[in-house]
Amino acid sequence: MTNARQQFRPRGMRSLATVAHEREFSSAISFMRPVERLQMNQGNYHQPVLEKEITDLLAAQAAGVVIDATLGGGGHTAALLARAPQLRVLGIDRDDAAHAAASIRLAEFGERVRLVKATFAEMAEVVNSEAQWINKEPIVGILLDLGVSSRQLDDPTRGFSFRADAPLDMRMDPTTGESAADYIARVDVHELVAILRENGESRFAGAIAHSMKRRLPRTTNELTACVEAAVPMAARRRGHVATRAFQALRIAVNGEAEQLASGLAAAMNVLSTGGLLVVISYHSGEDRVVKEILHEAHTGGCHCPVVLGCVCGAVQRVEVFKASAILPSSDESELNPRARSARLRIARKVAP
Ligand SMILES: C[S@@+](CC[C@H](N)C(=O)[O-])C[C@H]1O[C@@H](n2cnc3c(N)ncnc32)[C@H](O)[C@@H]1O
């Protein structure tokens, strides 16, 4: 007898490349049999951050499709579908493991969910390929809950964390691109210095980068040893000495900066007028990019002096909800440490 994982793998995780050949399946998940043991495990996949705030916002939208562009374990999507019967969700993630978990968790919603394996930079292509399922309904919301899930971080085989020794991989989609170990071996020391600096490792970026190039780490423990060898004990800050190096490599290996810029641009294009763009970021570099791109869309790129008013004909594309980001409550941060660094920004599309 095949288990549920084997059963849904061929159809549940649809890549953008094969999506066109899979039209015969009316729903990517509707055929799945829930498996009690797996379902229980999915409960711990990832605790959704700012779940109530996000569900409140999106559930107030008129009937249509919400794109959960960072599906993960499907936590936000499940909460939204349970709350808002007028909505359907198109879920996107680049990680097969996320699809496996979300497929099971969301099976109860049948045809109201469609899952596609893709990056969120490919959102426009996903929307085109899913035109039949979308069925001309408006895209009334898009959620980007950036970064990695707790499951990805905690999976001792994925190499995202210094907490367990593992091959130094760090790819959200291990079927494509290069591992962190191969990336370190390929790039020159200047590129390593730059990515470490961009991630706030200012004083020891050079020493850490040289240490990496000398030792060419292939495992998470070896990477930690590179950082420890480069940063004197007296200069170590609170938290683990290798935190920033791990994050910087993860961002580089997954092209997260490029993905974010392209994903936000795609999101603003595919949203229907009146639709909400909801973005949660987890570090200051990410939040700065979100803030700048939303500001640019808010002003329409207008740089005319305020005293003159706009004379360049720029068109405002979005209305930004608040100048500052929304933070989780202290209660949520206490219960879910991952929420502590979260910043939520929201915009409504007001013009094509
Ligand atoms: C913070 S988790 C999302 C958790 C989700 N909201 C939940 O409630 O379970 C981020 C997810 O986005 C995915 N992801 C990150 N960057 C992506 C990208 N550029 N394209 C597609 N998926 C991405 C990751 O694989 C991960 O599963």
Image (tube, grey):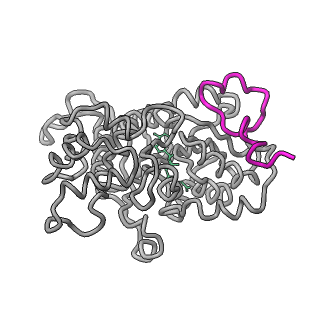
Relative to 300, say whether 152 is above or below.
below
In this rendered view, identify the residue nearer to me: 101 or 226: 226
The x, y position of residue 63, in whole percent, is 64, 46
Relative to 170, say whether 351 is above or below.
above
Q: Which segment is the magenta one?
A: 1-28
Q: Quadrant of residue 55?
A: bottom right
What's the residue at 65%, 52% (across, down)?
101
Which residue lies most toward the front here?
215
On whether residue 298 falls in the magenta region, the answer is no
What's the residue at 42%, 65% (across, down)?
339
In this rendered view, identify the residue nearer to me: 322 or 125: 125
Which residue lies most toward the top here?
21
Q: Quadrant of residue 82?
A: bottom right
The x, y position of residue 41, in whole percent, is 66, 62
What's the residue at 49%, 37% (across, down)?
120
For the C terminus, the quadrant is top left
Relative to 265, say whether 233 is above or below.
below
Q: Quadrant of residue 43?
A: bottom right
On whether residue 19 falls in the magenta region, the answer is yes
What's the residue at 18%, 35% (across, down)?
190
From the viewer's perspective, is 129 left or right of 310?
right
From the viewer's perspective, is 260 left or right of 196?
right
